Amino acid sequence: MSSPYDDGAAPGGAVPPPAGGPSAGSPGEAKRHAWWRPELGLSLVVFVLGVLVIVGTLDVSAASSALGLGPRFFPILVGSALIVIGAFYTLDVLRGGRGDPEESEDIDADAPADWRSVGLVSGVFLAFTALLTTLGWIIASSLLFFGLSVTLGADNKVKAAIVAVVLGVVTYVAFVRGLGVTLPGGLLQGVL
Protein backbone atom coordinates (compact mmCIF):
# COMPACT_ATOMS: atom_id res chain seq x y z
CA MET A 1 0.00 0.00 0.00
CA SER A 2 1.51 3.33 -1.00
CA SER A 3 1.47 6.47 1.13
CA PRO A 4 0.71 9.94 -0.20
CA TYR A 5 4.10 10.95 1.27
CA ASP A 6 6.14 8.34 -0.67
CA ASP A 7 8.23 10.97 -2.39
CA GLY A 8 9.02 13.01 0.70
CA ALA A 9 8.89 10.40 3.44
CA ALA A 10 11.15 10.95 6.40
CA PRO A 11 13.92 8.45 7.06
CA GLY A 12 12.63 5.26 8.61
CA GLY A 13 9.30 5.49 6.77
CA ALA A 14 7.76 8.05 9.17
CA VAL A 15 5.20 10.37 7.66
CA PRO A 16 6.11 14.05 8.11
CA PRO A 17 3.60 16.25 9.94
CA PRO A 18 1.38 18.49 7.84
CA ALA A 19 2.62 21.98 7.05
CA GLY A 20 2.06 24.44 9.87
CA GLY A 21 2.87 22.06 12.72
CA PRO A 22 1.21 19.04 14.24
CA SER A 23 -1.90 20.82 15.49
CA ALA A 24 -2.69 22.96 12.45
CA GLY A 25 -5.53 21.36 10.59
CA SER A 26 -5.27 18.06 12.44
CA PRO A 27 -8.48 16.04 12.60
CA GLY A 28 -8.29 15.92 16.42
CA GLU A 29 -8.40 19.69 16.71
CA ALA A 30 -11.24 19.95 14.22
CA LYS A 31 -13.27 17.46 16.26
CA ARG A 32 -12.43 19.23 19.51
CA HIS A 33 -13.76 22.62 18.34
CA ALA A 34 -16.38 21.52 15.80
CA TRP A 35 -19.22 21.81 18.33
CA TRP A 36 -18.38 25.41 19.32
CA ARG A 37 -19.69 28.10 16.97
CA PRO A 38 -20.79 31.74 17.47
CA GLU A 39 -24.42 30.67 17.12
CA LEU A 40 -24.03 28.49 20.22
CA GLY A 41 -22.65 31.45 22.17
CA LEU A 42 -25.66 33.56 21.17
CA SER A 43 -28.13 30.82 22.10
CA LEU A 44 -26.53 30.43 25.52
CA VAL A 45 -26.61 34.20 26.10
CA VAL A 46 -30.36 34.25 25.28
CA PHE A 47 -30.96 31.35 27.68
CA VAL A 48 -28.93 32.95 30.52
CA LEU A 49 -30.69 36.30 29.99
CA GLY A 50 -34.04 34.56 30.43
CA VAL A 51 -32.87 32.98 33.67
CA LEU A 52 -31.54 36.32 34.94
CA VAL A 53 -34.80 38.11 34.09
CA ILE A 54 -36.84 35.56 36.04
CA VAL A 55 -34.44 35.54 39.01
CA GLY A 56 -34.47 39.35 39.10
CA THR A 57 -38.26 39.41 38.91
CA LEU A 58 -38.67 37.16 41.93
CA ASP A 59 -37.55 40.02 44.18
CA VAL A 60 -40.37 42.29 42.95
CA SER A 61 -43.22 42.50 45.42
CA ALA A 62 -46.34 44.53 44.71
CA ALA A 63 -50.06 44.01 44.69
CA SER A 64 -51.69 42.81 41.51
CA SER A 65 -53.89 45.11 39.46
CA ALA A 66 -57.64 44.88 39.00
CA LEU A 67 -56.99 42.52 36.10
CA GLY A 68 -54.96 40.20 38.34
CA LEU A 69 -51.73 41.11 36.58
CA GLY A 70 -48.96 42.47 38.74
CA PRO A 71 -45.60 43.96 37.87
CA ARG A 72 -44.10 40.44 37.76
CA PHE A 73 -46.31 39.16 34.95
CA PHE A 74 -44.61 40.60 31.89
CA PRO A 75 -41.00 40.12 33.04
CA ILE A 76 -41.75 36.48 33.88
CA LEU A 77 -43.46 36.08 30.50
CA VAL A 78 -40.47 37.60 28.68
CA GLY A 79 -37.95 35.63 30.78
CA SER A 80 -39.78 32.36 30.13
CA ALA A 81 -39.92 33.10 26.40
CA LEU A 82 -36.16 33.81 26.39
CA ILE A 83 -35.47 30.51 28.16
CA VAL A 84 -37.60 28.54 25.70
CA ILE A 85 -36.09 30.31 22.66
CA GLY A 86 -32.56 29.89 24.03
CA ALA A 87 -33.13 26.18 24.72
CA PHE A 88 -34.56 25.49 21.26
CA TYR A 89 -31.85 27.57 19.58
CA THR A 90 -29.12 25.71 21.52
CA LEU A 91 -30.65 22.38 20.50
CA ASP A 92 -30.81 23.51 16.87
CA VAL A 93 -27.16 24.62 16.88
CA LEU A 94 -26.00 21.37 18.51
CA ARG A 95 -27.89 19.42 15.84
CA GLY A 96 -25.99 21.28 13.09
CA GLY A 97 -28.08 24.40 12.48
CA ARG A 98 -26.17 27.44 11.27
CA GLY A 99 -27.01 31.12 10.96
CA ASP A 100 -27.40 32.30 7.38
CA PRO A 101 -25.00 35.03 6.25
CA GLU A 102 -26.55 38.42 5.58
CA GLU A 103 -27.60 38.61 1.95
CA SER A 104 -30.12 41.45 1.99
CA GLU A 105 -30.21 43.74 -1.03
CA ASP A 106 -30.15 46.98 0.93
CA ILE A 107 -27.46 46.08 3.50
CA ASP A 108 -23.76 46.26 2.77
CA ALA A 109 -22.11 43.78 5.13
CA ASP A 110 -18.70 45.24 4.29
CA ALA A 111 -19.67 48.84 5.16
CA PRO A 112 -17.99 50.30 8.25
CA ALA A 113 -20.02 50.76 11.43
CA ASP A 114 -21.87 54.05 11.80
CA TRP A 115 -20.28 55.10 15.09
CA ARG A 116 -21.93 58.52 14.99
CA SER A 117 -25.40 56.93 15.16
CA VAL A 118 -24.26 54.50 17.85
CA GLY A 119 -22.95 57.41 19.91
CA LEU A 120 -26.12 59.47 19.42
CA VAL A 121 -28.42 56.57 20.37
CA SER A 122 -26.28 55.88 23.45
CA GLY A 123 -26.41 59.57 24.36
CA VAL A 124 -30.21 59.64 24.03
CA PHE A 125 -30.52 56.64 26.37
CA LEU A 126 -28.10 58.15 28.89
CA ALA A 127 -30.00 61.46 28.82
CA PHE A 128 -33.26 59.55 29.39
CA THR A 129 -31.90 57.79 32.46
CA ALA A 130 -30.44 61.04 33.82
CA LEU A 131 -33.66 63.04 33.32
CA LEU A 132 -36.30 60.42 34.14
CA THR A 133 -36.74 61.30 37.82
CA THR A 134 -36.61 65.06 37.26
CA LEU A 135 -38.85 65.33 34.19
CA GLY A 136 -41.07 62.31 34.84
CA TRP A 137 -41.97 59.38 32.65
CA ILE A 138 -44.19 61.14 30.11
CA ILE A 139 -41.78 63.96 29.27
CA ALA A 140 -38.58 61.87 29.47
CA SER A 141 -39.96 58.96 27.44
CA SER A 142 -41.40 61.35 24.85
CA LEU A 143 -37.96 62.92 24.49
CA LEU A 144 -36.45 59.41 24.30
CA PHE A 145 -38.81 58.28 21.53
CA PHE A 146 -38.39 61.56 19.62
CA GLY A 147 -34.60 61.54 19.98
CA LEU A 148 -34.34 57.96 18.78
CA SER A 149 -36.60 58.53 15.79
CA VAL A 150 -34.65 61.63 14.69
CA THR A 151 -31.31 59.91 15.27
CA LEU A 152 -32.40 56.90 13.23
CA GLY A 153 -33.56 59.05 10.32
CA ALA A 154 -37.16 60.22 10.76
CA ASP A 155 -38.02 62.54 7.87
CA ASN A 156 -41.07 64.26 9.37
CA LYS A 157 -40.03 65.65 12.75
CA VAL A 158 -43.50 66.99 13.61
CA LYS A 159 -45.05 63.58 13.08
CA ALA A 160 -42.20 61.99 15.10
CA ALA A 161 -42.86 64.43 17.97
CA ILE A 162 -46.60 63.68 17.98
CA VAL A 163 -46.02 59.92 17.95
CA ALA A 164 -43.43 60.29 20.75
CA VAL A 165 -45.85 62.19 23.00
CA VAL A 166 -48.66 59.70 22.31
CA LEU A 167 -46.34 56.78 23.13
CA GLY A 168 -45.20 58.49 26.34
CA VAL A 169 -48.78 59.06 27.52
CA VAL A 170 -50.04 55.62 26.45
CA THR A 171 -47.20 53.75 28.16
CA TYR A 172 -47.66 55.83 31.34
CA VAL A 173 -51.40 55.12 31.47
CA ALA A 174 -50.89 51.43 30.65
CA PHE A 175 -48.34 50.91 33.42
CA VAL A 176 -49.82 53.19 36.11
CA ARG A 177 -53.54 52.62 35.58
CA GLY A 178 -53.50 49.18 33.97
CA LEU A 179 -50.76 47.41 35.93
CA GLY A 180 -50.51 49.55 39.05
CA VAL A 181 -46.80 50.23 38.52
CA THR A 182 -45.55 53.52 39.94
CA LEU A 183 -43.69 55.65 37.40
CA PRO A 184 -42.16 59.04 38.21
CA GLY A 185 -44.53 61.94 37.51
CA GLY A 186 -41.79 64.58 37.53
CA LEU A 187 -42.93 67.99 36.31
CA LEU A 188 -46.45 66.68 35.65
CA GLN A 189 -46.89 65.22 39.16
CA GLY A 190 -49.78 67.52 40.14
CA VAL A 191 -51.48 67.23 36.76
CA LEU A 192 -51.62 63.43 36.64
Image (cartoon, grey):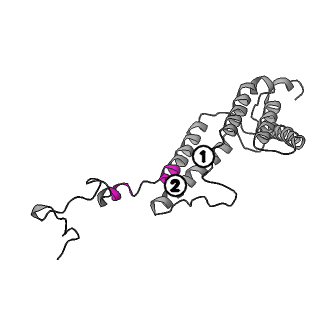
Under mark 1, the amino acid is Gly
Identity of the amino acid at label 2? Answer: Ala
Q: Secondary structure at mark 1?
A: helix
Q: Quadrant of residue 174?
A: top right
Whichever of callouts 2 and 1 sits on the residue coming sooner in the sequence is 1
Q: Which quarter of the figure is the C terminus placed in?
A: top right
Residue 183 picture location, percent across and down:
76, 31
The location of residue 47, given as percent across then percent down, is: 53, 48
Can you name the residue that lies furthest to the bottom here? 1
Q: Residue at x 34, y 55 (%)?
A: 32
Q: Would residue 47 appear left or right of 61 to someone viewing this image?
A: left
Magenta stretch in the rendered image? 29-43
Give the image quarter of residue 190. top right
In this view of the protein, which residue sits in the foreground, 92 or 71? 92
Q: Circle 2 sits on which residue?
A: 87
Q: Is residue 146 above or below residue 16?
A: above
Residue 37 on the magenta segment: yes
Find residue 91 and report its horizontal and vertical position in percent: 48, 59
Q: Name the residue nearer the viewer: 126 or 108.
A: 108
Q: Is residue 60 magenta?
A: no
Mark on residue 106?
Answer: none
Q: Residue furthest front?
A: 7
Mark 1 lies on residue: 79
Name which residue lies at 80% across and 33% down: 143
Q: Main secondary structure of the magenta part?
A: helix
Q: Which element carries disc 2, helix, strand or loop?
A: helix
- Mark 2 is surrounded, within 10 Å at the Cα level, by few (under 14), some (14 to 19) or many (20 or more) other residues, namely some
Most foreground residue, 175 or 142 = 142
Structural distance between the alpha carbons of marks 2 and 1: 12 Å
- Residue 186: name its quadrant: top right
